Amino acid sequence: MQRRGAWGRSVAVVAVAFVAGGVAAAVVLPRDAPTTGAALDVPGVVAPRSDPAGRSEAGRSDPAGTAPAATPAATAATAGAPTSAPPAIDLHSRSTTDPASLWVVVNKIHPLDPVRYAPDDLVQAGPEKVRAVVAHDLDAMLAGAKRDGVTLTIQSGFRDYAYQRTIFSNMLALHGREYAESLSARPGFSEHQTGLAVDVGSASRSSCDFDPCFASTDEGRWVARDAWRYGFVVRYTKENRPVTGYAPEGWHLRYVGRELAGWMHDEHVTTLEEVFGIRGSATYE
């Protein structure tokens, strides 16, 4: 399956980047790529993001020249020290279109292909099923929440094409198309069909399950703060609605693995579309 990169524009600029170990490598950048804080197209390496003043997380600039000059003693002490490389992640290492990929992107303009895809490695997770790759970290997340005095419940996991069609059709009949499509995915367009998504609930306030008030429960606050530690991201938020097209669902968690979830948390990136440079949409096309 085709892999999507962070850029799909013309290439015209060649720069030099220093990667782990201080080795210089030629980096080909898109013509209109930003010169600071960009995701350098070096396999396995993503540069640290910089702030608007051009100061990266790896080092702050001092345009006023107010920083004290390094003393000879300090220079000598650090001259032989190894250079610390920024955390690296290869965003090209997995497909974003293969439905079996951990990083597959499913949204209103990128359905599953094939549209009736069903994973072949489903396992039981409480009352629901998820892919085997999800199960260990899901158990770990439930246990981690329990240690913090929070009890998460599993409300939904894998849904096949036929089941999602039933759910969507019911929503359509009850609420009309516009409202239904803000809350429910069409069959073939649902993350639940990948086996990588779970809906969690609140043991302390079960009346808030599948309801916006979930975000205000102990469970909802815990998920928003800590789910990333176990490889899950809250996929649909108020802030990213223009990209995903769905109303906020603080209970809908998408598993992407601990490496990517941790990187997204550190970089303050909330959508898979932004991570991989893939177009999202508030409506179906």
Image (tube, grey):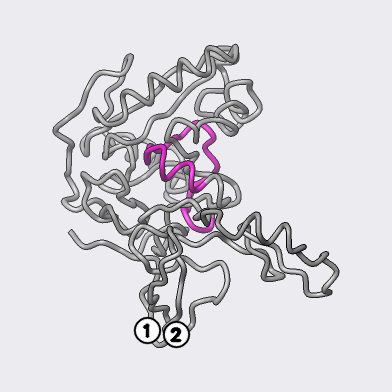
Assess whether mark 2 and mark 1 are in contact (beta carbons under 8 angstroms): yes
Q: Which of the pair 235/37 is nearer the observer?
A: 37
Residue 218 location, quadrant: top right
Residue tagged 1: 11
Secondary structure, mark 2, is loop
* Whether residue 228 is situated above or below residue 78 in the rendered picture: above
* Whether residue 223 is situated above or below residue 42 in the rendered picture: above
Within 10 angstroms of label 1, few (less than 14), some, or many (20 or more) residues? few
Image coordinates for residue 92, horizontal then vertical, percent: 31, 59
Amino acid of disc 2:
Arg
Q: Which of the pair 201/30 is nearer the observer?
A: 30
Residue 45 location, quadrant: bottom left
Q: At 38% from the left edge and 80% from the top edge, which residue is drawn?
A: 9
* Numbered label attached to residue 227: none
Q: At 41% from the left edge and 22% from the top edge, which residue is drawn?
A: 155
Secondary structure, mark 1, is strand
Location of the N terminus (image quadrant):
bottom left
| Residue 281 visible at all | no
Confirm whether the magenta stretch covers residue 189: no
* Numbered label attached to residue 31: 2
- Which segment is the magenta one? 242-264
Image coordinates for residue 166, horizontal then vertical, percent: 28, 35
Confirm whether the magenta stretch covers residue 243: yes
* Whether residue 89 is situated above or below residue 22 in the rendered picture: above
